[in-house]
Amino acid sequence: MNLVLITALGVGGATIIGALLGFAFKKISHKFTDITLGFAAGVMLAAAVLGLILPSLEYGGKFGIVATVIGIFVGALCLSLVDKIVPHLHKLVGADIEEHKNAGLDKVLLFVMAIAIHNLPEGIAAGVGFGSGDTSQAFLIAGGIALQNIPEGMVIIAPMLASGISPKRTFLCAAATGLIEVIGTMIGYFAVSVSQIILPFSLAFAGGTMLYVISDEMIPETHAHGNERGATYALLVGFCIMLISDVLLG
């Protein structure tokens, strides 16, 4: 339990680390953020497949494929529904973060709220990983999500400061988005711990949400500024590092 809580704080804290970097380097190039986000996408892709979807098949037994496929699609559909209500990063930031210099406060706060809402299922994915009892795979999942949170925390800062929000409130808003992830991690962990019967579906559901985030949000964002080649290779590097880690920890 203590290990889960510490990891949850680490996953949420990654957003705060990104926010601090955002304060330190207010003019971060798109190339840097795209390559970093591409690397994180590769890590998350491997974590979703190796740490969530394949274990879902194993825990599901003879009919595990049914629960896994359904879980993947239900997870993706849930995030798709959330996206219809509150659009996320690439839909609000657009092609250039500098556009937010003239953006209204309401739009910027919507941007931050969207990140917070999308952080909940990511946290749940990390918690479900621990609920499965496979600590090594759970760390891979949590690590992938944490890496993704760093560049996301970075891009929160500039638009909020540009809209006139004080640095103190900007930091608190960024920290709040990370706190949502901590809450999600604990929800995922306790939900699976209470009922192991739903474990295969829960793992696949969490994997589906991660696949949706990667395809619908992370990859489009990394390909929006002319840096798709570097972002693609960064994704491959992240994916391969997770493969090697899985073999060494397995």
Image: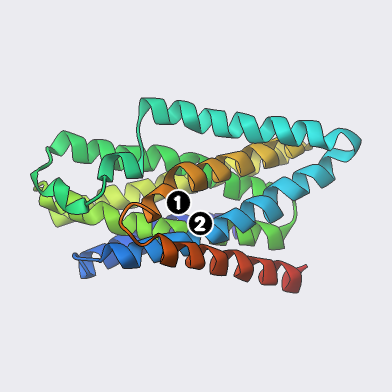
Let me know if residue 142 appears in the view.
Answer: yes
Judge the density around disc 2: few (<14), some (14-19), many (≥20) Cα neighbours within 10 Å.
Answer: many
Q: Is residue 226 left or right of residue 43?
A: left
Towards the viewer: 79 or 177: 79
The tally of labels here is 2
For the point 51% across and 55% down, the residue is 145
Towards the viewer: 104 or 116: 104
Label 2 or label 1, whichever lies nearer to me, is: 1
Q: Is residue 56 left or right of residue 228?
A: right
The quarter of the picture where the C terminus appears is: bottom right
As helix, strand or loop, the secondary structure at mark 2 comes to helix
Residue farthest toward the right in the current orientation of the protein: 62
Let me know if residue 198 appears in the view.
Answer: no
Q: Which residue is mark 2?
A: 41
Q: Amino acid at mark 2?
A: Ala
Q: Is residue 118 left or right of residue 164?
A: right
Asked if marks 2 and 1 touch (Cβ < 8 Å), the reply is yes
For the point 52% across and 40% down, the residue is 121
Visual colour scheme = rainbow
Q: Residue 227: which numbered mark, if any?
A: none
Towards the viewer: 244 or 192: 244
Q: Is residue 60 left or right of residue 16?
A: right
Q: Which residue is mark 1?
A: 219
For the point 70% across and 29% down, the residue is 70
**Picture quadrant where residue 6 is located:** bottom right
Residue 155, position as x, y percentages in the image: 28, 55
Judge the density around disc 1: few (<14), some (14-19), many (≥20) Cα neighbours within 10 Å.
Answer: many
Q: Amino acid at mark 1?
A: Ile
For the point 52% across and 62% down, the residue is 235
